Image (cartoon, rainbow, N blue to C red):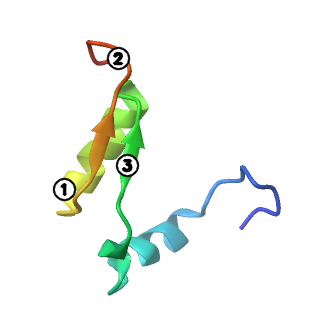
């Protein structure tokens, strides 16, 4: 994992977090319904993870 506050989480570590027994203990919020936000929401939905998708505008992307 990166030492910086804004570093990325390696995909293996992220997968372990998503499959951990207590992964549903915290709410998941996707901010922005652009291409990346929608892709993240699709991945969460495929895994059966509950999430909230927030978008400031009246339309996606």
How many badges with numbers are in the image?
A: 3
Residue furthest right in the image:
3
- Alpha carbon of mark 1 to alpha carbon of mark 3: how far? 16 Å
Q: Around disc 1, counting alpha carbons within 10 Å, would you say few (fewer than 14), some (14 to 19), or many (20 or more)?
A: few
Nearer mark to the viewer, of 1 and 3: 3
Mark 1: which secondary structure?
A: helix
Q: Which residue is painted at 44% across and 78% down in the image?
A: 16
Q: Which of 53 and 11 is in front in this view?
A: 53
Please identify the quarter of the rendering in which residue 46 is found: bottom left
Pointer 1 or 2: first along the chain: 1
Marked residue nearer the N-terminal end (3 or 2): 3
User: Closer to us: mark 1 or mark 2?
Assistant: 2
At a point 53% along the width and 73% down the height, the residue shown is: 13
Asked whether, in this view, residue 13 is left or right of residue 44, the answer is right
Left or right, 4 with respect to 60, comes to: right
Q: Label 2 near label 3: C-beta < 8 Å?
A: no
Q: In the rendered image, which residue does mark 3 sit on?
A: 29
Q: Mark 2 points at which residue?
A: 61
Q: In this figure, which residue is indicated by the disc labeled 1?
A: 46
Q: Percent from the top left, x then y, of residue 26?
A: 38, 69
């Amino acid at each position: 994992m990166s030492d910086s506050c804004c570093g990325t989480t390696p995909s293996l570590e992220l997968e372990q977090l998503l499959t951990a027994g207590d992964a549903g203990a915290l709410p998941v919020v996707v901010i922005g319904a652009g291409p990346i936000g929608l892709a993240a929401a699709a991945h969460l939905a495929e895994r059966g993870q509950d999430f909230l998708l927030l978008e400031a505008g009246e339309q996606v992307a």
